[in-house]
Image: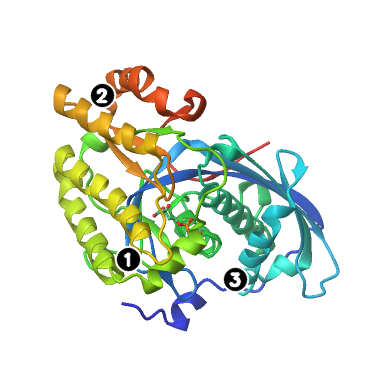
């Protein structure tokens, strides 16, 4: 299962390019996603230690425009990154690393000068990771441009319906940020090879291929911004800490077992069983950080207060609201569409008080990345 053969990755090397447009631009949007079974621990070149599954979101998105201009190739990457119209040099090392990882699959990268203009629908300082949506949006731009280089029309180049393009976009996005591989499609995406999920792969995210009960349609996610600003521990550092974590192997096994269980849960529409898995996954992720060396507590007092209030509300009202967490203090409140009004009322009345400046974002499941026509 661990072996990724060269032949598998070779399928993402493009055919020889036939066209080299002088200049132009292409815009794409990609949403963030929230993992239900968490990816935490990787090996090799951005390969996950266990399979994960996420809801693709819709409101929290990155929109990226890739401007390109033919250059005289010298083997180097030439690009600048702008966030909300301002040069953002701090993003450039991560993009340079991304380009380095993908140059074999998109060799045109050294043929052009690029200006990458990006903006998020959520505030940069919100603590919501923009790497998933950002890398996914950039990957879609690159796949579109590649299509034009292969003789296609730039404006209609990327088709969300074309399997090979979706796969390449997710494959590239993964090399930028693992979770970005799950932001190309929606509403439910699996990344990581799992024996019971046909077509699943360590190389890219695939749309969840089985029946999903209508209880999970249009599932809602309100993100409570407990702690804004820089992450206390970057994903890179966090994933690395799993190498020496004594509980790592048990955790990877548990994640795969949880995904197996979710398969039946999605089919039956059993939200109570869903809640047990999703909350346990979030707490296991945090437990891994507490059990790492060095160790970290990523929750804040208000994170715990919110969790306790969600549990109390559920007990007292029979609500099916639950929570999940990323590697930080913010809380994702998950609830079925049928409970939207009463849960949002509960959030406003009881939970908002524990958010920084009362800030939260209502979101819901969505369909993934697409080209933005200007
Ligand atoms: C806690 O995808 O940000 O959100 O591959 O190093 O970029 P890199 O990591 P990243 O890790 C996300 C971890 C997580 C869980 C998840 O989304 O599955």
Is residue 365 visible in this depiction of the protein? no
Which dot marks residue 50?
A: 1
Residue nearer the viewer, 42 or 145? 42
Mark 2 is surrounded, within 10 Å at the Cα level, by few (under 14), some (14 to 19) or many (20 or more) other residues, namely: some
Confirm or deny contact between disc 1 and disc 3 (CB under 8 A).
no
Which residue appears at 25% of the width and 24% of the height? 338
Residue 266 position within the rendered picture, expressed as x and y whole percent measured from the top left: 20, 46
The residues tagged by marks 2 and 3 sit, at their Cα atoms, a distance apart of 44 Å
The residue under the point 31% across, 20% down is 346
Q: Nearer the viewer, residue 297 or 68?
A: 297
Which of the marked residues, 1 or 3, is nearer the chain's N terminus?
1
User: Where the N terminus falls, by quadrant?
Assistant: bottom left
Q: Nearer the viewer, mark 1 or mark 3?
A: 1
Q: Are marks 2 and 1 in contact (CB under 8 Å)?
A: no
The residue pinned by badge 2 equals 339
Rendering quadrant holding ligand 1? bottom left
Q: Which mark is residue 101?
A: 3
**Secondary structure of residue under mark 2:** helix
Asked which secondary structure carries label 3, the reply is helix
Colour convention: rainbow
């Amino acid at each position: 299962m661990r072996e990724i053969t060269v032949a598998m990755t070779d399928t993402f090397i493009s055919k020889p390019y036939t066209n080299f447009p002088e200049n132009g631009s292409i815009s794409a949007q990609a949403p963030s996603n929230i993992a239900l079974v968490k990816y935490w621990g990787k090996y090799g070149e951005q390969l996950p230690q266990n399979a994960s599954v996420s809801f693709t979101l819709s409101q929290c998105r990155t929109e990226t425009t890739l401007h390109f201009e033919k250059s005289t190739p010298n083997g180097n990457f030439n690009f600048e990154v702008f966030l909300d119209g301002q040069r953002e040099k701090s993003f450039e090392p991560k993009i340079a690393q991304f380009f380095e990882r993908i140059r074999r699959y998109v060799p045109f990268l050294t043929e052009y000068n690029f200006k990458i203009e990006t903006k998020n629908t959520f505030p940069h300082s919100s603590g919501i990771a923009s790497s998933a949506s950002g890398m996914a949006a950039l990957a879609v731009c690159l796949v579109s441009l590649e299509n034009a280089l292969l003789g296609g029309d730039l404006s209609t180049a990327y088709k969300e319906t074309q399997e090979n393009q979706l796969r390449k976009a997710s494959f590239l996005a993964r090399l930028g940020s693992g979770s970005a591989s799950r932001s190309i499609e929606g509403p439910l995406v699996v990344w990581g090879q799992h024996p019971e999920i046909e077509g699943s792969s360590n190389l890219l995210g695939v749309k969840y291929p089985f029946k999903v009960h209508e209880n999970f349609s249009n599932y809602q996610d309100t993100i409570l911004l407990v702690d804004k600003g820089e992450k206390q521990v970057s994903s890179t550092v966090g994933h690395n800490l799993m190498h020496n974590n004594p509980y790592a192997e048990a955790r990877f096994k548990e994640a795969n077992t949880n995904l197996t269980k979710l398969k039946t849960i999605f089919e039956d529409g059993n939200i109570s069983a869903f809640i047990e898995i999703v909350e346990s996954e979030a707490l296991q992720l945090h437990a891994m950080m507490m059990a790492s060396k060095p160790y970290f507590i990523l929750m804040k007092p208000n994170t715990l207060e919110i969790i306790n209030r969600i549990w109390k509300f559920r007990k007292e009202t029979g609500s099916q609201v639950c929570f999940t967490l990323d590697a930080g203090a913010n809380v994702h409140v998950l609830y079925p569409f049928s409970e939207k009004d009463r849960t949002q009322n509960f959030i406003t009345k009881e939970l908002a008080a524990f958010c920084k400046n009362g800030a939260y974002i209502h979101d819901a499941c969505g369909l993934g990345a697409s080209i933005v026509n200007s």
